[in-house]
Image: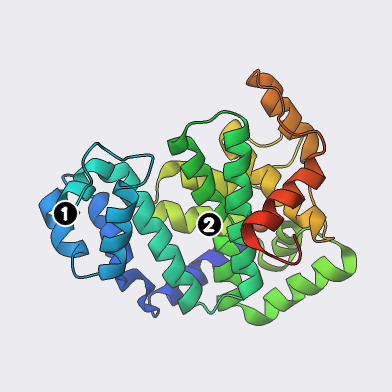
């Protein structure tokens, strides 16, 4: 399939899905408007008890906690600020994408594990909580393009899955053959179009970066976490240990793990309870 045709079909068929009418998507759009006001955001969020509760809890978490607890939604919104709120809304949007596209649970689980591990790598490298949060969100969403390809083109995507299994072809190479585009390109195009934070678009675009340069530093934790997961699950994977060591060396941080594979495995086992970990 020619690449333009794949992308155009996705965009056209997206119009028939109520995803872009979801509350979370409207909130992302509003945060990206020229002059968003907290009063308006409060009005939009307060009728959604889940989201409102999540925001107040986050404002009272160890990272933001002030001497007095934040009790009102308005105080919580102001304390977190637009940048963080947008990330909360993106995460909520992603949850509705999974439900609406009926994404297989193992794909969602892969995102969750990648999120945990990318954050763990960031913390090991001494990144601050806000940076670690960005890698966590990047890990969660990195394969969002796969969800849309598999949903809109179920049969061709079966071919991709077969090629991955039988020929041990990495997913993005099989997709390139079948669709003319990769899930990184699809995901990054959609997320840029939807005004998602640019760090997220960059991570999605570069999480399978090939070539001697490897991934850009901003995408490295997700690249490595993803590589580890594919290796652990016996699939084709991109070498990730050398780029990880080089990244730590460039940051002048001593690697806090002796045996990367065993320690990453143990970390995920204690944090996700996945039998595969
Ligand atoms: Fe991927
Ligand atoms: Fe992945």
Within-10-Å neighbours for mark 2: few <14, some 14–19, many 20+: many
What residue is disc 2 on? 141
Q: Quadrant of residue 173?
A: bottom right
Q: Provide residue 228's location: percent of width, then percent of height.
A: 75, 49
Quadrant of the image occupied by residue 247: top right
Ligand 2 closer than 8 Å to the CB at disc 1?
no
The residue that appears at 76% across and 51% down in the rendered structure is 265
| Residue 115 against residue 274 in the figure, above or below | above
Residue 140, labelled with which disc?
none
**Residue 72 circle label:** 1
Quadrant showing the N terminus: bottom right
Q: Is residue 221 above or below residue 98?
A: above
Residue 196: x and y, percent? 39, 51
Dot 2 or dot 1: first in sequence order is 1
- The answer to whether residue 236 shows anywhere in this view is yes
Residue nearer the viewer, 10 or 22 = 22
Label 2, secondary structure: give it: helix
Q: Quadrant of the C terminus?
A: bottom right
Q: Residue furthest left?
A: 39
Q: Is residue 89 left or right of residue 204?
A: left
**Rendering coords of residue 134 (x, y %):** 48, 43
Residue visible at 86% across and 62% down? 168
């Amino acid at each position: 399939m020619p690449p333009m045709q794949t992308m155009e079909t996705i965009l056209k068929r997206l119009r028939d899905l109520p995803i872009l009418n979801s509350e979370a998507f409207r909130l992302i759009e509003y945060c990206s408007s020229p002059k968003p006001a907290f009063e308006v955001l409060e009005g939009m969020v307060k009728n959604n008890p889940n989201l409102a509760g999540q925001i107040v809890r986050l404002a009272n978490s160890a990272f933001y906690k002030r001497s007095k607890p934040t009790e009102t939604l308005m105080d919580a919104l102001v304390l977190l600020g637009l940048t963080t709120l947008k990330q909360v809304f993106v995460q909520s949007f992603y949850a509705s994408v999974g439900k609406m596209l009926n994404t297989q649970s193992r794909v969602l689980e892969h995102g969750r594990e990648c999120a945990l591990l990318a954050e763990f790598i960031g913390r090991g490298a001494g990144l601050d909580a806000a940076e670690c949060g960005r890698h966590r969100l990047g890990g969660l969403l990195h394969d969002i393009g796969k969800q849309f390809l598999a949903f809109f083109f179920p049969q061709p995507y079966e071919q991709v899955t077969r090629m991955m299994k039988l020929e041990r072809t990495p997913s993005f190479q099989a997709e390139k053959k079948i669709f003319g585009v990769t899930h990184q390109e699809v995901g990054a195009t959609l997320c840029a179009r939807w005004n998602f934070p640019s760090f997220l678009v960059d991570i999605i675009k570069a999480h399978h970066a090939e070539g001697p340069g490897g991934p850009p530093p901003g995408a490295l934790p997700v690249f490595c976490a993803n590589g580890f997961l594919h290796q652990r699950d016996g699939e084709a994977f991109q070498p990730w240990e050398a780029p990880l060591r080089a990244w730590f060396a460039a940051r002048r941080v001593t690697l806090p793990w002796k045996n990367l594979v065993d320690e990453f495995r143990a970390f995920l086992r204690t944090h996700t309870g996945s039998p595969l970990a």
